[in-house]
Image (cartoon, rainbow, N blue to C red):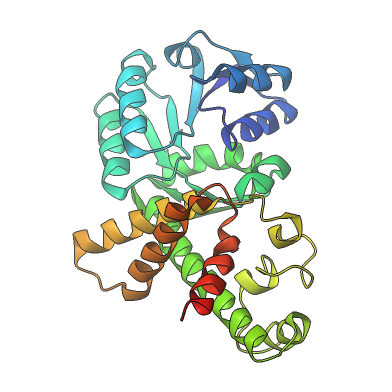
Amino acid sequence: MPAIGFIGLGNMGGPMAANLVKAGEHVLGFDVVPVSREASARDGVQIAANARGTVENADIVISMLPGGEHVLSVWNDIVPVARQGTLFIDCSTIDVESARKAHRLAASRGIATLDAPVSGGVGGAKAATLTFMVGGSEHAFARGKPVLERMGKRVVHCGEAGNGQVAKICNNMILGVSMIAVSEAFVLGEKLGLSHQALFDVASASSGQCWSLTSYCPVPGPVPASPANNEYKPGFAAALMLKDLRLAKAAADSVKASTTLGAKAARIYEDFAQQGHSAADFSAIIKLVREQSENR
C-alpha cells in the first residue's frame, strides 16, 4: 500500500498523523525531537531515519513545521528524492512568500503542491475536527482533499498557491482582535458591577456574539469547555497567536494594506509574551487587560 510521509510530529502533527493511521493509512513519519518520534511510534506511525526516509515510497508527503525557513529547508532536502507525481501538502502556518517559494521549488521538479494551514488547535488535531484552508491548483486539491478529510471536518479551497496561508492569517487576525475586544468588555463589566454570566447571556444572543465569546469565553463559568475553566492551559497558545499576528502584519506591510487593529493586537500580545505568558492560552490576554486597567 502506498505510504503517506509525515514530517513534523509535534503537538499538532503527531495527532494528525495518528488519525491517518486510524483511518487505515500506512504513515512514514519523522521529527527531529525524539519524544515526538516515540509518541507517534506508539500511535502506529512507522518512524523513518530522517526526513528523506518519509518520501522515497510515498505518494503524498505532509509537513507540519514551525516556520517558513523550516519548510523551505526541509523541502529543499526532500524534493530531490521525491518521485514525479508525488503530492506535497504543507500544513504549517508560515508567511505567504515562503509558501509560494515552496510551491515553486516543488513545481520545478514536477511535484504537485498544496499549502493547507489549519484552524482548530491541538483539540481539533486530536479529534480530527480541524479546518483546512487550502491553496493550490484544482487538480492538486482534488487529490489532497480525501487525505485532509481524514484529519479534519472542513476542507476549503481558497484558490491559487499561497492562498491557504492568506486565509489563515486573515482569520487569525480577526480572532486575535476579537479576543482582546471580548476581554476588554468583560473587564469593563467587572469594574461596573456586571456579572460575567449576565454579560455573556446578553452578548451571546445579541450583536456582540462572536466565536471568542461563545466558544472560548475568556472568563470562567459561561463556557465550561473554554481554557478559562482550566487555568488557561492551551488550547491555542499566546505565542502562536503572536506568531500569526506578526505574519498578518508582515503580509499587510508587503501589500500596503491598512490593518490598524491587527497591528495593535500584535503589540498587545507581544507585551503579554514579554511578561512570560507565551505558553498560556491566548484567551488569557484578559489578565493583561485587567492589569492595565488597575494601573490606569
Residue found 19% across the figure and 67% down from its top: 256
Report whether residue 133 is seen. no
The residue nearer to you, when weighing 290 against 213, is 290
Taking 124 as reference, is 181 left or right?
left
Taking 106 as reference, is 171 left or right?
right
Q: Please state, as top left, top right, bottom left or bottom right, where the N terminus lies in the image.
A: top right
The residue nearer to you, when weighing 203 against 135, is 203
Q: Where is residue 174 in the image (x, y as percent from the top left)?
A: 47, 69
Q: Where is residue 80 in the image (x, y as percent from the top left)?
A: 31, 16
Report whether residue 152 is seen. yes
Q: Position of residue 164 (x, y in %)?
A: 42, 51
Residue found 65% across the figure and 68% down from its top: 218
Farthest top residue in view: 49
Q: Count how many numbered circles sit on residues in the image.
A: 0
Q: Position of residue 87 (x, y in %)?
A: 44, 30
In the displayed structure, 99 sits above or below 243; it is above
Q: In which image quadrant can residue 223 be found?
A: bottom right
The residue nearer to you, when weighing 292 against 207, is 292
In the displayed structure, 58 sits above or below 152; it is above
In the displayed structure, 232 sits above or below 57; it is below
Residue found 72% across the figure and 22% down from its top: 43
In the displayed structure, 48 sits above or below 75; it is above
The residue nearer to you, when weighing 275 against 11, is 275
